[in-house]
Amino acid sequence: MPLDQATRTLQDTGALWRIDAVSPQAVVRCACDALIAGLDSPSLRILAGLTRAEADYHVLDILPAALAELGLDFYPRDSRGGQEAAARALAAQAVSGSLTPRELAAAIHRHFGHDLPLTERLAMLDDEYDLGAYATMTGEQIDQEVIAEARRLTHEQP
């Protein structure tokens, strides 16, 4: 994995962990991948060395330091910046094909409801999926709108 991709993945995984979209064990695996890719810091090494059982208890203590040592952001739980970073990380997964459009819309709706202005369109599109036969668009049209919105979010990265 290229260094810039490892950096982005580590940042995204931290943001997704803060909204409970990935497990502490996923954070540890990501730290291992980051080390293999060439990222390095004392706290990143400690994070990568956690066992599955330790991850549940120690990611919160170690991840902020690891991200700070690498010049990355650690977001407080429920912060607007953290929510937007997590939404962009989810959108990037849909653009890359690791999430389907339906999965992206559902995840955005589940994590943020209609409360995050950045993702309001995706929450509305999730509602449209749920309407089934009563929807104003076909499933394919909704998919296209979701991917277009995901691309918009990934291109508007701060």
Image (cartoon, rainbow, N blue to C red):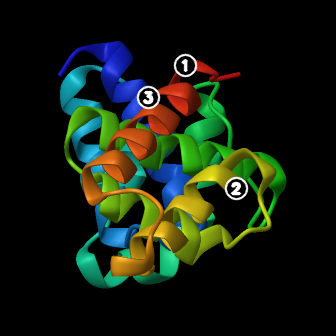
Residue 28 appears at what percent x and percent y? 32, 58
Q: Mark 2 points at which residue?
A: 120
Kindly identify the residue that appears in the image at 71 percent across and 22 percent down. Answer: 158
Q: Mark 1 points at which residue?
A: 155
Q: Left or right? Give the position of 109 relative to 134.
A: right
Q: Nearer the viewer, mark 3 or mark 1?
A: 1
Q: Earlier in the sequence, mark 2 or mark 3?
A: 3
Residue 10 appearing in the image: yes
Kindly identify the residue that appears in the image at 40 percent across and 55 percent down. Answer: 47
Q: Distance between the residues labelled 2 and 1?
A: 17 Å
Q: What element carries label 2?
A: helix
Q: Is mark 1 on a helix, strand or loop?
A: helix
Instruction: Residue type at mark 2: give it.
Output: Glu
Q: Name the residue under label 3.
A: 8
Q: Is residue 102 above or below residue 94?
A: below
Q: Earlier in the sequence, mark 3 or mark 1?
A: 3
Instruction: Residue type at mark 1: give it.
Output: His
Instruction: Check disc 1: other Cα within 10 Å, few if <14, some if 14-19, many if 20+.
Output: few
Of 37 and 107, the residue lying toward us: 107
Instruction: Residue type at mark 3: give it.
Output: Arg
